[in-house]
């Protein structure tokens, strides 16, 4: 069974057997949510989608028998039907547009099955799937989709040139004094970090201030936490293995540290370790997750919607 998740940032495919073993998996950066002028998916993004599907076809995946779903960017786009018709005509692949509630359920289904295999599943877990244009937060009796993702958040930023104040220069000279400041947003504002990085962090705090998280254990399954885990292990983007990140524990501070480290990463190294044109979005996503969480225990799982599509098929679950 081939399951395809056509997301706002990535197109992910998995070949899975009826025992939920993953036989092969693929991932492509399509950035469908990027440069969505007038709520329209760009020609460049459409080209990336078709190139990804062509590669799958060249690798002998049977697209005509696949189950494919599309998520947030396609829910917003005015040209979604046009894109789906072109895909069906060229690849005989039917893509189903799913709502946010179905997306969350499929994502959780994929995560839960992996957690069971790792013997980490428990009923009181909560789930966070931060995509390119939306963020789904769920638990066993609650699910909500928020209108932000790593691409849409970054592209809504209005960066301003800010000259370092006398206070920032003081803390740059005497950084030990920053520890005396208890207010986290004020501490970031007065820190000697790059101005654009601070603006991302403070905007993320404003974005998440009204989101009330329930639960002490959160499962994270999107590209930001998985890439962070791989980067911590010095794994290059092309060598990424799901097994290397599944079940890994992260702390909230890891996201801020990751953003800081890759901020100064030269472009060629960023391409090798993070993937092409992903650096700025990973920084934005890291700041969102840093702002969103506090003292929760964070567990990383690679599985999500594409696996959920297959599992739902095998279990005959209708959404």
Image (spheres, rainbow, N blue to C red):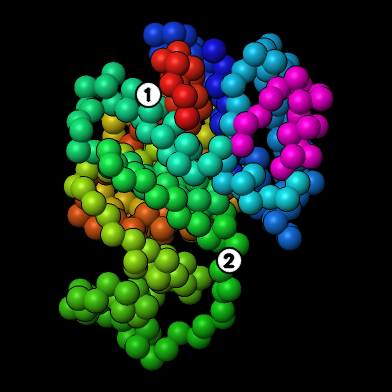
Mark 1 lies on residue: 243
Mark 2 lies on residue: 156
Task: Confirm whether the magenta stretch covers residue 85.
Answer: yes
- With 309 as the anchor, is 170 left or right in this view? left
**Gap in Å between the C-alphas at discs 1 and 2?**
34 Å
Q: Is residue 89 above or below residue 130?
A: above
Q: Which mark is residue 217?
A: none
Instruction: Look at the image and tell me whether residue 69 can be seen.
Output: yes
Q: Residue at x 21, y 22 (%)?
A: 119
- With 165 as the anchor, is 61 left or right in this view? right
The dominant secondary structure in magenta is helix
Q: Residue at x 32, y 28 (%)?
A: 112
Q: Quadrant of residue 118?
A: top left
Q: Secondary structure at mark 2?
A: loop
Q: Position of residue 48 (x, y in %)?
A: 72, 38
Q: Is residue 3 above or below residue 185?
A: above
Relative to the observer, which residue lies in front, 54 or 238?
Answer: 54
Q: Residue at x 29, y 34 (%)?
A: 248
Which numbered disc flags the more N-terminal residue, 1 or 2?
2
Within-10-Å neighbours for mark 2: few <14, some 14–19, many 20+: few
Within-10-Å neighbours for mark 1: few <14, some 14–19, many 20+: few
Q: Position of residue 297 (x, y in %)?
A: 21, 45
Q: Residue at x 24, y 76 (%)?
A: 183
Tell me where the magenta segment starts and ends, as one range.
80-97
Q: Position of residue 236 (x, y in %)?
A: 49, 34
Does the CB distance between marks 1 and 2 fall below 8 Å? Answer: no
């Amino acid at each position: 069974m081939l399951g395809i998740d056509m997301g706002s940032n990535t197109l992910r495919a998995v070949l899975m057997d009826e025992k939920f073993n993953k036989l092969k998996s693929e991932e492509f950066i399509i950035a469908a949510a990027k440069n969505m002028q007038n709520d329209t998916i760009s020609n460049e993004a459409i080209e990336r989608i078709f190139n990804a599907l062509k590669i799958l076809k060249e690798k002998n995946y049977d697209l005509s028998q696949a189950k494919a779903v599309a998520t947030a960017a396609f829910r917003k786009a005015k040209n979604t039907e046009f894109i789906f018709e072109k895909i069906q005509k060229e690849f005989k692949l039917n893509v189903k547009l799913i709502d946010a509630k179905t997306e969350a359920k499929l994502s959780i289904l994929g995560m839960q099955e992996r957690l069971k295999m790792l013997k980490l599943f428990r009923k009181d877990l909560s789930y966070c799937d931060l995509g390119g244009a939306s963020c789904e937060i769920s638990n066993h009796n609650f699910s909500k989709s928020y209108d932000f993702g790593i691409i849409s958040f970054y592209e809504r930023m209005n960066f301003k040139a800010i000259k370092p104040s006398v206070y920032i220069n003081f803390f740059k000279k005497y950084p030990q004094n920053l520890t005396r400041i208890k207010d986290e947003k004020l501490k970031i504002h007065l820190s000697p970090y790059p101005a654009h990085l601070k603006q991302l962090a403070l905007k993320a705090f404003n974005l998440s201030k009204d989101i009330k998280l329930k639960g002490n254990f959160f499962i994270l399954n999107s590209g930001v936490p998985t890439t962070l885990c791989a980067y911590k292990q010095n794994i290059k983007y092309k060598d990424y293995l799901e097994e290397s990140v599944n079940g890994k524990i992260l702390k909230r501070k890891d996201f801020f540290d990751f953003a800081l480290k890759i901020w100064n990463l030269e472009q060629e190294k960023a391409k090798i370790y993070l993937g092409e044109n992903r650096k700025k979005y990973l920084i934005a996503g890291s700041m969102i997750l840093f702002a969103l969480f506090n003292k929760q225990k964070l567990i990383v799982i690679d599985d999500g919607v594409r696996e959920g599509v297959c599992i739902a098929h095998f279990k005959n679950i209708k959404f």
